[in-house]
Image: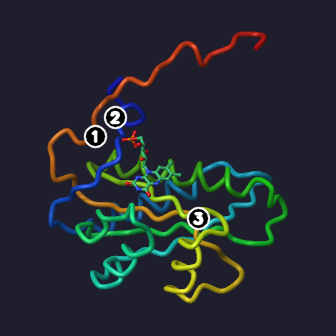
Amino acid sequence: MNNIIFTRRSVRKYLDKAVEPEKIDRMLRAAMQAPSATNQQPWEFIVIDDRKTIDKLAEFSPYAKMLPQAPLAVVILEKQGMRAALFTEQDLGAAAQNMMLQAVEDSLGTVWMGVGRGSERETFVTEMFSLPETVKPFGVFAVGYPAEENANKFVDRYDENRIHWNKY
Ligand SMILES: Cc1cc2nc3c(=O)[nH]c(=O)nc-3n(C[C@H](O)[C@H](O)[C@H](O)COP(=O)(O)O)c2cc1C
């Protein structure tokens, strides 16, 4: 239980250290490696390493107070008008998890901040980046080197009551 799937945790405190371009590249490649309905790949990304822009983005939600300490943020965007539009949210969840797991593999910490379809947070991010109608913000992700040792650590969430064999 010590592979990255089991040890990934939400990390909200970071070292004052930039994330190397090759690690950012791997995170984005991992995200785009995700499965998607009809292979529609409904994702785009805004990668933000500009301090002022990350600080401004922190205002999108009361639960984003870690952003002003983070050296990097990624906004995952949901492309609109996809052929399998019913499934884009699931596709993006897979992409987000892939991205976070690759970050852990590269000794980074991340936290996912939900945006929420039709929410005020969605409006904030849309206006902040002057997004066209072809994309909507799906999630905001803070990324950085964890300030605390073992921030990514195993927490056992296994619950056999959630498993149903052959019938419910
Ligand atoms: C859709 C989604 C939205 C989330 N939104 C926030 C958020 O706004 N702020 C935050 O600090 N954590 C947020 N989280 C992180 C969860 O709080 C965290 O994943 C959960 O408590 C489990 O902890 P772990 O990630 O360490 O396993 C979000 C997670 C998901 C999947």
Q: Nearer the viewer, residue 20 or 83?
A: 83
- Note whether ligand 1 is within 8 Å of mark 3: no
- Note whether ligand 1 is within 8 Å of mark 2: no
Which quadrant of the view contains residue 110? bottom left
Judged by depth in the image, the label closer to the viewer, 3 or 1, is: 3
> Label 2: how many residues lie within 10 Å, few (<14), some (14-19) or many (20+)?
some
Judge whether 165 appears above or below 113 on screen.
Answer: above
Asked if disc 3 and disc 2 are in contact, CB closer than 8 Å, the reply is: no
Point 36% across, 81% down: residue: 56
Given the image, on which type of amino acid does mark 1 rest?
Asn
Q: Which residue is mark 3?
A: 138
Mark toward the start of the polypeptide (2 vs 1): 2
What is the number of the mark on residue 7? 2
Q: Quadrant of the N terminus?
A: top left
Using residue 73 as the reference point, say whether residue 76 is left or right of it. Answer: right
Point 21% across, 52% down: residue: 146
Identify the residue at the far right of this view: 83
Given the image, on which type of amino acid does mark 3 rest?
Phe
Q: Which residue is mark 1?
A: 152
> Label 1: how many residues lie within 10 Å, few (<14), some (14-19) or many (20+)?
many
Asked if disc 2 and disc 1 are in contact, CB closer than 8 Å, the reply is: yes
